[in-house]
Image (cartoon, rainbow, N blue to C red):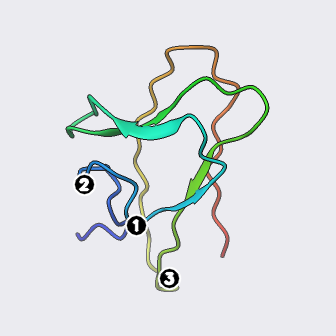
Amino acid sequence: MSNLIINGDFATGNLNGWTQIQTQNVFVGTPGFNSTYCYFIGNYNTFSPLISQSINTTVGHVYTLTYYLKNETNLHGMHISFNG
């Protein structure tokens, strides 16, 4: 099975492959889970950090999305959206 998400584990050490929206206090840091790097959201109060990526899928195929979330502060919510 191939990975459809580009740089999904942030192994490049940056956000290559991702579209970044409202990324103040957002960066790729260490350590990651099963990777050297991770997507890190710093302190935020007035904005919602967002990264996105579009992938091509095939009608009738089943896809699995797996991710890890570590909350070290008072996380206000995590949203994953699918459109299509």
C-alpha distance separating marks 1 and 2: 10 Å
Question: From what the image shows, is residue 26 above or below residue 63?
Answer: above
- Numbered label attached to residue 60: 3
The residue most toward the right is 46
Q: Is the Cβ of the residue at disc 2 closer than 8 Å to that at disc 3?
A: no
Res. 52 image quadrant: bottom right
> With 60 as the anchor, is 82 left or right in this view?
right
Q: Name the amino acid, label 3.
A: Gly
For marks 3 and 1 on the same chain, the one whose residue lies earlier in the sequence: 1
Q: Nearer the viewer, residue 65 or 74?
A: 74
Question: From what the image shows, is residue 20 above or below residue 46?
Answer: below
C-alpha distance separating marks 2 and 3: 32 Å
Q: Name the amino acid, label 1.
A: Gly
Q: Is the Cβ of the residue at disc 1 closer than 8 Å to that at disc 2?
A: yes
Residue drawn at (49%, 15%), measured in percent from left and top?
Answer: 72
Q: Nearer the viewer, residue 33 or 28?
A: 28
For label 2, count other residues whose C-alpha is less than 10 Å away and answer few (under 14), some (14-19) or many (20+): some
Residue at the spot of label 1? 17
Res. 78 image quadrant: top right
Residue at the spot of label 2? 12
> With 65 as the anchor, is 76 left or right in this view?
right
Q: Position of residue 16 (x, y in %)?
A: 37, 62
C-alpha distance separating marks 3 and 1: 26 Å
Residue drawn at (35%, 71%), measured in percent from left and top?
Answer: 4
Q: Name the amino acid, label 2.
A: Thr
Q: Position of residue 8 (x, y in %)?
A: 35, 55
Residue drawn at (41%, 59%), measured in percent from left and top?
Answer: 64
Residue drawn at (32%, 59%), measured in percent from left and top?
Answer: 7
